Amino acid sequence: MSDALIEGYARALFEVARAEGTLDEVEDELFRFARSYESSDALRNALTDEHVPADKRQAIVEDLLDGKATTTTVQLVSMVVGSGRSRDLPAIVDSLVQRASSAKQLDLAEVRTAVALTDDQQARLKAALENATGKSLNLKTIVDPTVLGGVVATIGDVVIDDTVRTRIDQLKSRL
């Protein structure tokens, strides 16, 4: 899909969520759904299989998100899937998240950890990253089992890698 089409979908989803007054919640839910979509071959295959009718793919989304996301989020994901743009869902959502961060005058910080962080841990991490970068941040966390321990934070072009693997590699190079 062209960048212009991805941006068009992202802008439309952003405007709908903002008009509904649920931008923060919808943005977070879409972000988490896009990360789940990327990490699950079964989900990705089910939502992109052209042999499965669009209404069945939309039903899969509605069943998955029922009770776990706002009605707005369910409808937006269902609309993207129903229009045959499932493959582009992560790019659309990433563009929406960037747009929402910009609207709030925040920089986007994607943080990868091996385990889910508590709200308190997220707040402390956000404060530490804001202090280190001097920027106000919109923190998005991703559970990534390949991160054995520690944190990898990406803020724009800056990557802060404080993982166990990186520390071991640094020790090896010193020895």
Image (cartoon, helix red, strand yellow):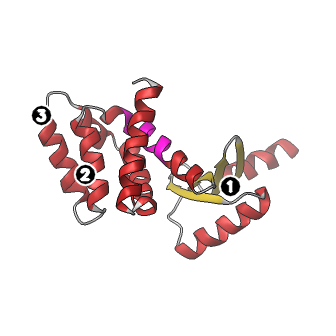
Whether residue 175 is visible to the viewer of this picture, yes or no, is no
Q: At which x and y percent is residue 158?
A: 72, 44
Q: Which residues are magenta?
A: 88-96
- In the picture as drawn, the residue positioned furthest to the right comes out as 174
Residue 93 screen position, x and y as percent = 43, 44
What residue would you read off at disc 1?
A: 164
Residue at the spot 64% in from the left edge and 58% down from the top edge: 137
Question: What residue appears at the point 19 percent right and 27 percent down from the top-left corner?
Answer: 50
The 10 Å Cα crowd at callout 1, few under 14, some 14 to 19, many 20 or more, is: some
Labels 3 & 2 near each other (Cβ < 8 A): no
Residue furthest to the top: 2
Q: Nearer the viewer, mark 3 or mark 2?
A: 2
Identify the amino acid type marked 3. Pro
Residue 165 lies in the magenta stretch: no
* Quadrant (top left/top right/bottom left/bottom right) for the N terminus: top left
Would you call the spot at circle 3 few (<14 residues within 10 Å), some (14-19), or many (20 or more)? few
- Residue placed under numbered mark 2 in the picture: 75
Mark 2 residue type = Gln
Q: Residue at x 45, y 27 (%)?
A: 4
Using residue 118 as the reference point, say whether residue 136 is left or right of it: right
